[in-house]
Image (cartoon, rainbow, N blue to C red):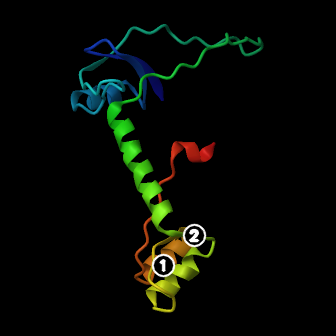
Amino acid sequence: MIRYDLVCDKGHEFDGWFSNSEAFDKQAKRGFVECTVCGSARVQKQLMRPSIGAKSNRKVEAPAQKMVAGEADPRLQAMMQIVRDYRKHVETTAENVGDRFADEARKIHYGESEERGIYGNATGNEARDLIEEGIAIHPLPRLPEDGN
């Protein structure tokens, strides 16, 4: 893998990882490399300092680096808000059945329980089995804040 410092025609700087220099050239030519800030496909490599490894028998302390996040793409922000709204709608209009999701979905599907909206947890195998039985299910998308 090779990392390139990149810049778009509007001057936004970012980096990208590619399997080799030929991969970057092919992707850039086809318009697949886009600026992370403005979405421009007019991107080129910047001059980079060479990466020279230290001697293997010498410990080198890496200088402390500040991590700074760039501006979020407004399209991504809009999409994330739609996902948040969708999830909030499900959580306010459906019943959380927790780990009983697969059993409750079957009961509703086969008429053994009242028809209603439910959400909860299911393993991958449980979800696959429900789909194979013809029971319509849809996963709720995980949000970045779910990991906090």
x and y, in percent, of residue 146 in the image: 58, 47
For the residue labelled by badge 2, is the local secondary structure a helix, a strand or a loop?
loop
Name the one closer to the observer, 96 or 79.
96
How far apart in space, not on screen, are marks 2 and 1 (Cα)?
10 Å
The residue under the point 23% across, 21% down is 42
Name the one closer to the observer, 116 or 46.
116
Q: Check disc 1: other Cα within 10 Å, few if <14, some if 14-19, many if 20+.
A: some
Name the one closer to the observer, 18 or 13.
13
Residue 130, numbered circle: 1
Q: Are marks 2 and 1 in contact (CB under 8 Å)?
A: yes
Q: Residue furthest front?
A: 92
Disc 2: which residue: 122
The residue under the point 47% across, 55% down is 88
x and y, in percent, of residue 33 in the image: 31, 29
x and y, in percent, of residue 32 in the image: 28, 33
Name the one closer to the observer, 98 or 64.
98
Q: Is residue 130 above or below residue 42?
A: below
Q: Is residue 139 visible?
A: no
Q: Is residue 33 visible?
A: yes
Residue 26, numbered circle: none
Q: Check disc 2: other Cα within 10 Å, few if <14, some if 14-19, many if 20+.
A: some
Q: Amino acid at mark 1?
A: Leu
Q: Is residue 140 above or below residue 105?
A: above
Name the image quarter holding the C terminus: top right
Quarter of image, res 137: bottom left
Q: Amino acid at mark 2?
A: Ala
x and y, in percent, of residue 115 in the image: 44, 83
Left of 94 or right of it: where is 65? Answer: right
